[in-house]
Image (cartoon, helix red, strand yellow):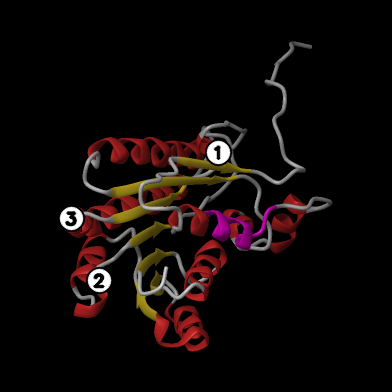
Amino acid sequence: MTQQTVFVTGASAGFGDAIARRFVAEGARVIAVARSADKLEKLAGELGEAVLPRQLDVGDPEAVKSTVEGLPQDWREVDVLVNNAGLAKGLEPAHKADLRDWDEMIATNVRGLTHVTRALLPGMVERGRGHVINLGSIAGTYPYPGGNVYGATKAFVHQFSLNLRSDLHGTGVRVTNVEPGMVGGTDFSKVRFDGDQAKADKVYEGTTPLTADDVAESVYWAASRPKHVNINVIELMPVVQSFSALQIYRES
């Protein structure tokens, strides 16, 4: 990874923060983007000149375009894009869900990911090298009550990643989708429950979930394989999580 440039979205906390630190530890330079300028500056303060912080809401297409076009000349050749920015909002059934939550998830998890990818992909293709790593979720494969639009956005990420692989055939550009299960120690559930920390903590009570570092290690591992190796999909869960029986509704 020495001298490689890595573009990480959602880099101010959780997976993104851990991913940025993992790559910098191996000698890479990281363009760290997120909505929180303060947290990005803190990250850059800790990691030094290896980090270029840029405030960005990936759900804003014009901001994505201007941010990528405004990168300093010596930071423009991005070797690895990690599309990490994403969120879940709410856990209500579809007929009770808040449409604003649905719109926010679609704007970040789908539109943001695609616009960032489209902005950086031409340069990768032109240089004949690069790697797009998308953060999906097991929610894109396995349904659960209240997962409605969140799961649908992650199913999009899965299929978009496969289709990118097909489009990029012969270009030298690699594509990986990393799909974690339950991960603790981040703000994921706190965001989902509108800041209710007690409710968020209840999700992980009595469990040993994955950590952000576990996810970061998977991302780094995929990126650090030999150039002729493409890891299509990584699905990981904590040992405490597995599959349950299909729901059966019985009339009383």
User: What's the residue type where badge 3 is placed?
Assistant: Pro
Could you tell which of marks 3 and 1 lies nearer the N-terminus? 3
Quarter of the rendering containing residue 93: top right
Of callouts 1 and 2, the N-terminal one: 2
Residue 86 at x, y = what percent? 46, 55
Q: Is residue 230 above or below residue 55?
A: above
Residue at screen point 71% across, 35% down: 242
Q: Is residue 149 left or right of residue 130?
A: right
Q: Are marks 1 and 2 in contact (CB under 8 Å)?
A: no
Q: Nearer the viewer, residue 36 or 213?
A: 213
Please check the rendered image and state whether residue 69 is part of the magenta-colored stretch, yes or no.
Answer: no
Q: Is residue 185 above or below residue 142?
A: below
Secondary structure beneath label 3: helix
Query: Which residue is disc 3 drawn over?
Result: 122
Q: CA distance from mark 2 to mark 3?
A: 15 Å
- For the record, the magenta segment spans 210-218
Front disc: 2 or 3: 3
Question: Magenta stretch: dominant SS?
Answer: helix
Q: Is residue 192 above or below residue 169?
A: below
Vertical comparison of 121 with 241: above or below: below
Location of residue 56 (image quadrant) = bottom left
Would residue 142 be seen by someone viewing this image from the given angle?
A: yes
Q: Earlier in the sequence, mark 2 or mark 3?
A: 2
Q: Circle 1 sits on which residue?
A: 139
Q: Residue type at mark 1?
A: Ala
Q: Residues within 10 Å of mark 3 (few under 14, many from 20)?
A: few
Residue in the picture at 25% in, 71% down? 67
Q: Is-magenta flag for residue 216?
A: yes
* Mark 2 residue type: Thr
Residue that numbered label 2 is attached to = 67
Q: Residue furthest left?
A: 126
Q: What is the x, y in percent for residue 43?
A: 50, 81
